[in-house]
Image (spheres, helix red, strand yellow):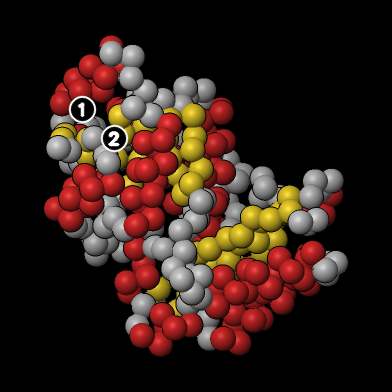
């Protein structure tokens, strides 16, 4: 049976017991409204740890003033049932007070420079600092040995890697593959907001990423590939925030000697903003 902890004392007592027994503890941080993508993160953590904790917390510090914090779907009962079925041992479901005991105005914040200002960071100022602020808290609260993060949020993973390294968190990160629908659309809680026509159009993002990869492998300069990717999506009816080619560290590939690339897209269909990416080698 899965256990649900809502206080830091209950969480700490359970995890300390596991650590005393010499068990490795895995963490899967989530904002709830869980789907198969999250469940696969639990399974990944399970494969690298003896016990798995999933946190379910809608984190206000990562939402911008115009974003959907109040409307963000909250489905705690379904989340706990899904986590149990996925093999999770403990659901950490803190209140706002448990997560930010001094209140939001006095909360200590984690700021990661540079990498947080580009791409999604440029479109969502403060977003990644909010993510790091809560993930640092989760690491301190849960004290995991390993923590699973999806590759779909490529920039989030890069920012968290940076934080873990710079603040010397003793946590091994487990990047998890993107889970896709049969037509290529990456799984996301946001897919449920898509209307029927939008849902039919949405896999075009993945097809666009594949086309960007093939053009780059075919020798097209990366800036032209970006223009091609953006034009393709705009023609299909998306409002494109970005369609870019970057190195694994999210630098522009100009001076890069390496052969690894990632193509990243953020595009809106109506009110729904979708992100996706594709990692590949130039030579493969
Ligand atoms: O990826 C998410 O769902 C969130 O950004 C995370 C990592 C759980 C932090 O709130």
Query: Where residue 26 sits in the image (x, y, percent)?
Result: 36, 32
Residue in the image at 39% along x and 46% along y: 41
**In terms of sequence position, does the residue under pointer 2 or pointer 1 come before the other?**
1
Depth check, front residue: 37 or 140: 37
**Element on which disc 2 rests:** strand
Residue visible at 58% across and 41% down in the picture: 113
Could one spot residue 52 in this view of the protein?
Answer: yes
Classify the position of the C terminus by image quarter: bottom right
> Do the residues bearing badges 2 and 1 touch, measured as CB atoms within 8 Å?
yes
| Residue on which the image places disc 1 | 11
Q: Secondary structure at mark 1?
A: helix
Residue at the spot of label 2: 53
Is residue 99 visible in this depiction of the protein?
A: no
Numbered marks: total: 2
Horizontal relation, residue 80 to residue 167: left or right? left
Q: Position of residue 187 (x, y in %)?
A: 41, 63
Q: Nearer the viewer, residue 45 or 101?
A: 45
Q: Residue at x 59, y 83 (%)?
A: 234
Residue 55 % position (x, y): 28, 41
Left or right placement of residue 244 versus residue 241 in this view: right
Q: Position of residue 226 (x, y in %)?
A: 71, 70
| Nearer to us: label 2 or label 1 | 2
Task: Say whether mark 2 is within 8 Å of ligand 1.
Answer: no
Q: Is residue 112 left or right of residue 58?
A: right
């Amino acid at each position: 049976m899965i256990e649900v902890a809502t206080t830091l004392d209950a969480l700490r007592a359970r995890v300390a017991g596991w650590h005393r027994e010499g068990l490795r503890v895995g963490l899967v941080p989530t904002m709830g409204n869980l789907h198969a993508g999250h469940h696969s993160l639990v399974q990944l953590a399970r494969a690298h740890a003896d016990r798995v904790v999933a946190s379910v917390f809608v984190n206000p510090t990562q939402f911008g003033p115009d974003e959907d914090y109040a409307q963000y779907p909250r489905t705690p009962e379904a989340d706990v049932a899904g986590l149990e079925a996925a093999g999770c041992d403990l659901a950490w479901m803190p209140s706002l007070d448990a997560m930010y005991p001094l209140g939001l105005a006095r909360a200590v914040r984690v700021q990661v420079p540079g990498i947080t200002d580009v791409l999604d960071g440029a479109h969502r100022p403060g977003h990644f600092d909010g993510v790091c602020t809560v993930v640092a808290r989760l690491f301190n609260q849960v004290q995991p040995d390993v923590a699973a993060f999806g590759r779909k949020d490529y920039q989030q993973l890069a920012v968290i890697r940076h934080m873990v390294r710079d603040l010397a968190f003793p946590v091994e990160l487990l990047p998890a593959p993107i889970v896709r629908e049969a037509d290529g659309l990456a799984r996301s809680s946001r897919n449920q907001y898509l209307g029927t026509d939008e849902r039919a159009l949405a896999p075009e993002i993945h097809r666009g990423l594949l086309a960007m990869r093939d053009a780059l492998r075919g020798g097209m300069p990366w800036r032209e590939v970006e223009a091609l990717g953006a034009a393709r999506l705009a023609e299909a009816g998306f409002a494109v925030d970005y369609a870019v080619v970057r190195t694994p560290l999210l630098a522009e590939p100009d001076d890069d000697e390496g052969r690894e690339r990632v193509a990243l897209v953020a595009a809106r269909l109506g009110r729904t903003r979708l992100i996706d990416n594709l990692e590949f080698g130039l030579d493969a």
